[in-house]
Image (cartoon, grey):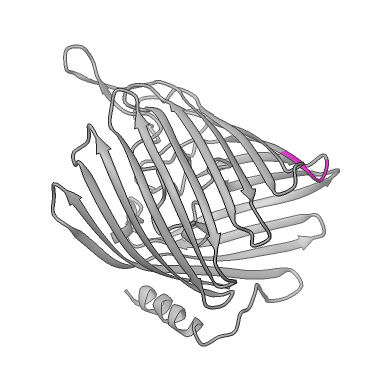
Amino acid sequence: MKLRIQLLGALALAAALPAFAQVKLNDTVTVTGWATGSYQYVQPSPGTATDSLNLDAALLQATITPAKKVTGTLSLYYRPAAEGGVSPGGSEVTLLDAYLAYDCGGGVTITAGKFLSYLGYESFYPIDDNMISLANQQLLAPIPGYHDGVKLDYSPDKTDTLGFSIADSEYQKPGYAATAGDGSLRHQAGFEAYYTNTAITNLTVWLGAGYETPTKAGYDTGGVTDEYNSKGVLIQDTHDVSVGDLWISYVVDKNNDTFAAEEIYKSGGYLNQGSDWLLYYQQNFTSKVSSWFCFSGENVDSGASYTRYSIAPNYAYNASLSFRLQYSYTAYKSYTINNASFYGAELLFKF
């Protein structure tokens, strides 16, 4: 509770501060951070309305450059129990990023430690998302979170970048809210690769894929779902998991109005296979006032599906503080409810 009060106090204080950037402690250490808090109201049909008022998430990150070509990154991530952020150990605070990166020269960087998946147009971090809630991820959750491993990124020129990673798993350790993998290559292993191109002015094309080897019994990371056999007996699904992700982003005009589209396909066995998609458009009305409009959906093969319509106006008080609203309407098929309306108001602070 004390931590939550302190972070909410920081949000309020930011309104009186001018815009500022990273805090440089000395020649080798730079600190950045952010926090988001929101009020959310959900009205399902049929069902009873629910609401929440929370500090949704906060992150404090240190970047350390002990040598010219070496960069270390550490971050502490806070997500309250009310937002599903408690690990099995009971902690609401997680060591999120913990990695070292080495610049090999020639556009090659090697990174080892705990880092975020390459995949996904929408960000893992609420501070960088277009809306208060994500456009998808509700049913299939095809976008992985954090895992431990090694990755290599290569930029042969100014318009092309590609990378490859080997990690302890592709999807998260059970109960860790996408903040950790399973911690062992022996139980299952994860692999990712991506390629991005910006050769056409204002256009970014990103293509990536992930793969997780078959799960050994008792070590399911959430990428695979248990299933029943023909006699109704629960069996362990040891299916492997693959996911493909394509997204594009295009800056439409001088106002930086932006169009984005994404298609994701996940294959992981029974009721764990299907697609997610989204269409985003950002309209910048002034330098401070903008809005995202989104049309999105998920479809589980032989399972539930939905389509969602969203609008998320945003007001930027300064570079450190902004305010966001959101309304979404979701129509479900073969699900526990028929539809749901979402209303939200969010305060975002960063330095």
Query: Which residue is painted at 43% across and 35% down in the image?
Result: 276
Query: Relative to 3, is 245 on the left or the right?
Result: right
Q: Residue furthest top?
A: 230
The answer to which image quadrant residue 351 occupies is: bottom right
Q: Answer left or right for 294 relative to 31.
A: left
Instruction: Estimate the x, y position of residue 9 in percent, counting from the top left.
Output: 41, 81
Q: Residue at x 49, y 56 (%)?
A: 129
- Picture layout, residue 112 above or below residue 9: above
Most common secondary structure along the magenta stretch:
loop
Residue 64 x, y percent position in the rendering? 69, 63
Give the x, y percent position of residue 172.
Answer: 43, 41
Does the stretch in magenta take in 222?
A: no
Is 146 located above or below residue 14 in the figure? Answer: above
- Residue 131 percent across, percent down from the top left: 44, 57
Which residue is pictured at 68% across the width and 60% down the height?
254
In the rendered view, tell whether residue 269 sits above or below residue 246.
above
Can residue 169 be seen from the camera position used here? no
User: Is residue 216 visible to us here?
Assistant: yes
What residue range appears in magenta? 157-161
